[in-house]
Amino acid sequence: MKTDKSRRKFLRVLPLGIFAGMAGVLAAAAFRFLRPVAAAQREAVWLDVAPVSELKGEKPLLRTVLAERSAGWSVTLEEQQVFILPAQKHQALSSMCPHEGCNVVWRDETNNFFCPCHDSAFAPDGERVSGPARRGLDPLPSREKDGILQVQYQTFVNNIKERIPRA
Amino acid sequence: MTADDKQTKTARPDGWLERWTRLPGLARALFDEPAAGFGAWARTTAGAVCMLVAVQVITGVLLAFYYVPSAESAHATVAYMEKVVPAGAWMRALHHYGSQWLTLFLVLHLAQGFWRASYRRRPVGWLASVLLLALVMAGGATGYSLPWDARAFFSTRVAEGIAGGLPLVGDALHHWLLGGTEISTMTVSRFFAVHAFANPALIVLVIAARLFIFREPRTKEEGRASSWEGWQQEQFARQAIVAGAVFLALALYALKYHAPLGPAASDAEMGYLPRPGAQFLWLFQTLKYLPGPVASLFAAVVPGLILVGLALLPFLDARQWRRTSSYKPRKASAVLFSLALLLIVTMTAVAYIGDARDPNVRAQLERQSAEEAAFRAEPFEPQRPAAPAPSTPQANATPSPAASVPSPDSPPAAYIKQCANCHGSHGQGAKPFPKLLGVGSKPRRTVEDIIGLLNDPVAYGLEPPMKSFATKLTDQEKREIAEWVVILKKK
């Protein structure tokens, strides 16, 4: 009787054990399979903005650069907006609001940058003035080469005080 | 004592599974009768089939996390899974070989059911298995096209040819299948939608109908059984053991053998020899013996006839439903079933042997697998935005023959004169003529090989319209062209 009982118990547990084993193998593989592959570190690329001679005046100028975005199996070219500050040695600022990532606009009438999404405002040099943003607009590295202004485009983690680049 | 006795005969009704799920009831409906020894183990094909269906669903859903059904991107996404994503090659191999194993186990399942004449007592289960086999074959055929390498492209072309050759419906079917008049990105998304949505939905429908909608005609014995008896529990454990063993075997097989993947369809050579998946080899081989329109009809009708014949079995035997004691399968159906099996087995064998014996075919197939191996060894190249159209070719700026260092921008004069018409001014190709970019990195394409190829293209597996240039070019010109072609890089 005793052996018969334990045999029955074994027969109940065995299939469940086998199913659990198969499910475990597949689940572990699925976890590895779905975890995003970290993009290889690439050296910074200098992107042409415009000839320096064309970037003049007191007001920030909105320009676009073509930045490569590498994601998984594809590399795409995407247009990104940057502000150039001709009055400040052609400093470049990302137009992406550090709050939730909307594109900020320049407003002549109030002489500041303004984010239309949540009303953050930034001074003409990019410093934070008011609104929910927790830091100023993100400066981008820029240089002049052969009379052409170039920038390195990058994005930073939103909605925090520190400026941490997105890997 | 008596209470204990009772418990050993029937499962405790207060078990967790019994209390909270319908599974024991379902399992009870699935097992047909007590058996022991070899007979009991032979009846475990259902467990393996269930497991393999589950594996197909799980791996299929996972692959869809990366796959993109378009002619431009499909191959890049599959190559990314194969080369970059962890466990990606294993996932693909599980799905690829799993579909072949599933076909095999469904055939085994039907064969053992046929042998026991279970279609008499279990007509619903039998019909469900036949439908499942048809749907699994359809899934295999559509899935073959999705990686969009040369293998996929040509298998699509064969499917297209077969569909288009059918009488009456051919043209319409062809048009619907391709989503136009040519194989294009529309074709890829159609095959994907059928493979990943329509076909699995039908499979789920068949399984649901089997489990939840239809009922088998009951025998007295089965009607009485109200709880899970000992033999059912034993049979369930046997099913689980076999399913587990088959899973382990498939998992190890998929670790060792990669699912095939060659260079993208756009890089395919002219002389590519397509070969279907193992489960279709017999049909492929049979079609070789038949002229065009007959072949189309055969390809559609014979598998159809086999499936319809199998599906009709329970009805042919309708009068014998109640006489469950009669175990001997009817002679006529036994003969037909055996003939069909014989055709399939023989033709599969003939296909393998034929390929192994024909030196030309073998050489080409070896070249193709060498090419696939070379492609597999290359690091993954992400898909890039299309380069801007090349500026006007400097065809007229002919370099002097003395120019010793060849550059991709300056093809030799003889190339411009003899080759550029088809292969493009800079080797970029012009559909349907293949590009020459990247040819140098392929097997058997050294400078000497290319010179030999220009002399005798057939010997290198190329097909017309590529013709011999043995007398049309001087040896010096051939060498110049070959030395220029090998430096062309893939774009």
Image (cartoon, grey):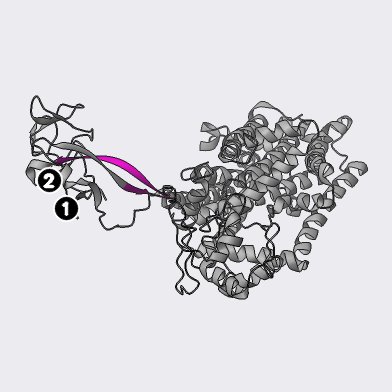
Queried whether the magenta region covers residue A153, the answer comes back as: no
Secondary structure of residue under mark 1: strand
Q: Amino acid at mark 1?
A: Glu
Stretch in magenta: A68-84
Sequence-wise first label, 2 or 1 = 2
Query: Is B218 on the left or on the right of B408, as rendered?
Result: right
Queried whether the magenta region covers residue A78, the answer comes back as: yes
In the rendering, at what x and y percent does residue B409 appear?
Answer: 45, 61
Q: Main secondary structure of the magenta part?
A: strand
Identify the subunit bearing mark 1: A
Q: What is the crowding at mark 1: few (fewer than 14 residues within 10 Å), some, or many (at least 20)?
A: some
Q: Amino acid at mark 2?
A: His
Q: What is the crowding at mark 2: few (fewer than 14 residues within 10 Å), some, or many (at least 20)?
A: many
Q: CA distance from mark 2 to mark 1?
A: 9 Å
Query: Is B255 on the left or on the right of B331, as rendered?
Result: left
Identify the subunit bearing mark 2: A
Q: On screen, A21 above or below B455? A: above
Q: On screen, B471 above or below A55? A: below
Quadrant position of residue B316: top right
Q: Pick whichever, B18 or B318, lies toward us.
A: B318
In the rendering, at what x and y percent does residue B168 appear?
Answer: 79, 30
Which disc, if any, is residue A90? 2
In the rendering, at what x and y percent does residue B6 appear?
Answer: 64, 39
Contact (CB < 8 A) between labels 2 and 1? yes
In the rendering, at what x and y percent does residue A67 appear?
Answer: 30, 46
Q: Which residue occupies 61% across, 61% down?
A: B418
Q: On screen, B340 above or below B181? A: below
Q: Pick whichever, B251 or A74, lies toward us.
A: A74
Q: Which residue occupies 63% across, 31% down?
A: B205
Q: Which residue is mark 1?
A: A144
